[in-house]
């Protein structure tokens, strides 16, 4: 089994990147430099006409959309990446979907407001309003981390190994620091994210992507 993952440093592609790195299975990481608009090249658009990362190529088939990629990896990688069955699996997928369809797009409104209005004078309002929404969503992730502690679990979805919820939580909190949100405001979540970042596979991916965990700068 050999797969190829197209990723952009710091993007949500970090999630499958870490899952593949931790799996011990062969794969090829292929960096896409968004600042150079490599995602709009004819070569990349042949894989994903939407010009988005991540893209996972498995046996010649290009798979897009992070939830679909994670579900594919869950079926393909030894031991999977999500709880195997029951309510634990349902809850993990529920939280993953919320991270992707609600928390992630809220940050996009902060980081790329021009995607949502062609009126530059509205960009500041979009950023400010969505930053407040994002703070509340990180607060929900804080409650997940607190519940994990109460259960005595090491990872957000349980189990003996980090999963997609853990590395997505790291990504979302790291993005929050870019938006000027102090991660220490969320002590349980911040402690957990630092534990995730210290994992060998995650640390290797962060080095490959040249990521700094905390970009918060006090006003």
Image: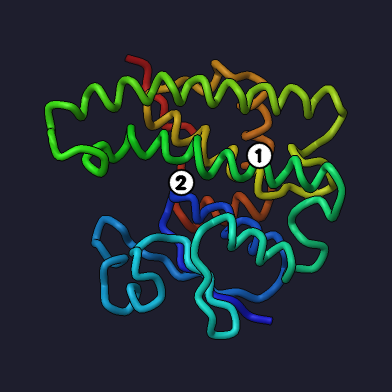
**The N terminus is located in which quarter?**
bottom right
Q: Is residue 182 above or below residue 5?
A: above
Could you tell me which residue is drawn at 13 percent across and 34 percent down? Answer: 119
Q: Residues within 10 Å of mark 2 (few under 14, many from 20)?
A: some
> Circle 2 — which element?
loop
Residue 138 visible in the displayed image: yes
- Disc nearer the start of the sequence (2/1): 1
- Front-most of residues 36 and 111: 111
- Front-most of residues 190 and 41: 41
Could you tell me which residue is drawn at 43 percent across and 60 percent down? Answer: 53
Residue 117's x, y, as percent? 20, 37
Using residue 145 as the reference point, say whether residue 35 is left or right of it: left
Identify the residue under disc 1.
Answer: 95
Q: Is residue 107 above or below residue 37?
A: above
Q: Of the numbered discs in the image, which one, if any, rests on residue 145?
A: none
Q: Nearer the viewer, mark 2 or mark 1?
A: 1
Using residue 80 as the reference point, say whether residue 107 is left or right of it: left
Identify the residue under disc 2.
Answer: 211
Could you tell me which residue is drawn at 77 percent across and 24 percent down? Answer: 147
Residue 198 visible in the displayed image: no
Q: Is residue 6 above or below residue 174?
A: below
Using residue 197 as the reference point, say whether residue 74 is left or right of it: right
Residue 94's x, y, as percent? 68, 42
């Amino acid at each position: 089994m050999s797969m190829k993952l197209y990723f952009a440093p710091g993007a949500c592609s970090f999630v499958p990147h870490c899952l593949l790195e931790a799996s011990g299975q062969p794969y090829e990481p292929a960096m896409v430099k968004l600042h150079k608009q490599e995602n709009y090249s004819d070569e990349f658009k042949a894989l994903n006409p939407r010009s988005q990362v991540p893209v996972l190529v498995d046996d010649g088939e290009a798979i897009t959309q992070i939830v679909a990629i994670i579900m594919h990896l869950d079926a393909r990688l030894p031991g999977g990446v999500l709880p195997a069955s029951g309510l634990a699996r349902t809850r993990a997928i529920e939280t993953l979907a919320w991270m992707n369809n609600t928390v992630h797009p809220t940050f996009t409104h902060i980081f790329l407001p021009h995607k949502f209005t062609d009126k530059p004078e509205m960009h500041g309002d979009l950023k400010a309003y969505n930053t407040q929404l994002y703070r509340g969503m990180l607060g929900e992730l804080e409650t997940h981390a607190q519940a994990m502690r109460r259960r005595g679990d090491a990872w957000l979805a349980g189990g003996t190994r980090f999963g997609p919820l853990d590395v997505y939580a790291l990504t979302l909190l790291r993005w929050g620091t870019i938006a000027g949100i102090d991660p220490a405001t969320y002590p349980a979540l911040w402690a957990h994210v630092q534990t995730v970042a210290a994992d060998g596979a995650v640390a290797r991916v962060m080095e490959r992507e040249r990521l700094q965990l905390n970009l918060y700068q006090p006003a």
